[in-house]
Image (tube, helix red, strand yellow):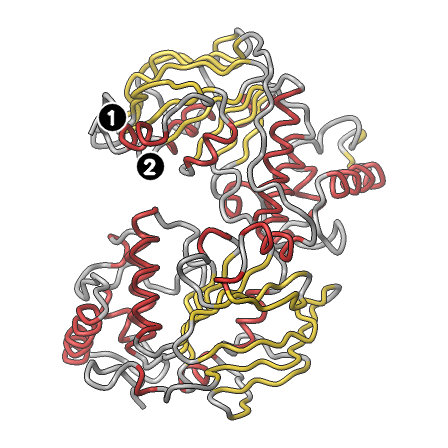
Amino acid sequence: MEPSRVQPETAGAALHPEGGAALRLTGITKRFPGVLANDAVSLDVRKGEILGLLGENGAGKSTLMNIVYGLYKPDGGEIEVNGSTVDISSPQQALELGIGMVHQHFMLVPDMTVAENIALAPSLLPGLSRVKDVERDVGEISRRFRLDVDPGAVVEDLTVGARQRVEIVKLLYRGADLLILDEPTAALTPTEWHELSRFLRSMADDGRSIIFITHKLDELFGLVDRCTVLRDGRVVDTVNIADTDKPSLAKMMVGRTVTLRVERPIVEPGKPVLEVKGLSVADEDGRRMLDDIAFQVRAGEVFGVAGVAGNGQDELVQALLGLVTTDSGEIWLHGERIDDCSPQVFTAAGGAIVPEDRHHEGIALELSVLDNLLMKEYQSPRYSKRGVIDFNASRKHADELIRHYQVRTAGVSLPARQLSGGNQQKLVLARELSRDPRLVIAFQPTRGLDVGAIEFVYGQLNERKKEGTAILLISYELDEIFTMADRFAVMVGGRFLEVLEGGQADPERVGLLMGGAEDGAP
């Protein structure tokens, strides 16, 4: 059986008569070992509406939507689609009911074309003529919704934003008229986010319903119609977005008043902890990824690196950790030049790293919370004797870190993959900051975190700053740079264009510099 397709002449409001609920959940409950993920959750999304689903990391948002999409079976409750009670046991059944979901991690085959990915279906083996049909239909959908998707492009050659559009087109092609987007902006640029929000609004105007899962308050205003807030697996409230504001939503989400903008502590900086002189790195084709980078980070200072992703930030971190070969330049830590740096040498010299990708670089997902916390200290005499780990001392240390860094976990033996994204980041912070480092490299430290977790991360970094730690903050979020950095460089094309004072920089001028205007002028 072929999947149903959205044809331009029939798609849109005709799929749902006006009025009523496209989806209604009543008393949905889901338990995992040691965790009540959803506790009698009830909500509805109306036809032609964008419903925001807001909550902290671990509040139960994704679990709830995975139930709607047939990936999880609820332990209790009822699901209605278009007024009829249904039992959704698989994603295929959800799609047959018109429900599609775009996950945080895309479900695409990288070395296949867009059309080939969309043609894939459990009951379909596409041949050449079938792919040609898909290319035609995808082109029609793309033009209709101004999605700018090339059906013949190879997926691995596409940007993150373009891949996301492919996932959406795939659902539209299969006839979905209720779309669930799980944290869709985690890796998007501001321009891609603007394009996505425009598209989602056009979808709602066309009669489709959208559930927009997020923990970012800014994304809700101007996009969603209503917002349901989850906390600890329960519904706190559902509000019209026009009748609320960010502080109110933040308080509902976290359960307390949240400081949406952290005050930057003023600390008299000490001597340079990290000094970089004339650092250059080229790729295999000889292209300069880092071009004569020079800066220093002093004790008690946050030095920021601002810029659009892909301008050498990854290579800078890799060079500082000894993961790439430098063509020229010097790296000094605490007055000592490091010629043969490696992650082990960096750690031994008092360095700590909060990496951009916590899943692949920050934690070992299959290892326990205890193993992850002890990863860099298991050889310490405090936790091992004659090569044998003292588990009593180790567990006591882990329990102390869990309490201090507010890691929500059922226990130290729980695999790290079962923690929410925010708690995984707190796990990384606990391991790295508890070792009293002299230098902390924080690369996108609040990526994918909710307002409560962001506030916590900023607070921990500022505490280290006040204690004299040097912090190198690399972020694509300009607000984060302005909030945290005492000084910062604007990085473009592997070069530092200018170093600016954090409290005096003009956002418009910084934006122009990030766009490549070397003098900060249009």
Q: Which mark is residue 288?
A: 1
The residue tagged with tag 2: helix, strand or loop? loop
Q: What residue do we see at 33% from left, 59% from top?
A: 196
Q: Nearer the viewer, residue 246 or 472?
A: 246
Q: What residue do we see at 75% from left, 64% from top?
A: 34
* Residue 42 in the image, given as x and y percentages of width and height: 62, 77
The quadrant in which the C terminus is found is top left
Residue 483 lies, with reference to residue 140, above or below; the image says above
Question: Farthest residue in the front direction?
Answer: 243
The residue tagged with tag 1: helix, strand or loop? strand
The residue beneath circle 2 is 308
Q: What residue do we see at 32% from left, 90% from top?
A: 1
Q: Nearer the viewer, residue 211 or 237?
A: 237
Is tag 1's residue or tag 2's residue first in the polypeptide sequence? 1
Q: What residue do we see at 52% from left, 29% from top?
A: 484
Which amino acid does the dot numbered 2 rest on?
A: Val
The reply to whether discs 1 and 2 touch (Cβ–Cβ < 8 Å) is no
Per the model, the C-alpha gap separating discs 1 and 2 is 17 Å
Q: Image quarter for residue 230?
A: bottom right
Residue 280 lies, with reference to residue 23, above or below; the image says above
* Residue 121 in the image, given as x and y percentages of width and height: 33, 79
Residue 41 lies, with reference to residue 420, above or below; the image says below
Q: Nearer the viewer, residue 480 or 412?
A: 480
Residue 284 lies, with reference to residue 469, above or below; the image says below
Which amino acid does the dot numbered 1 rest on?
A: Arg
Name the front one of labels 1 and 2: 2
Q: Nearer the viewer, residue 322 or 68?
A: 68
* Residue 143 in the image, given as x and y percentages of width and height: 17, 69
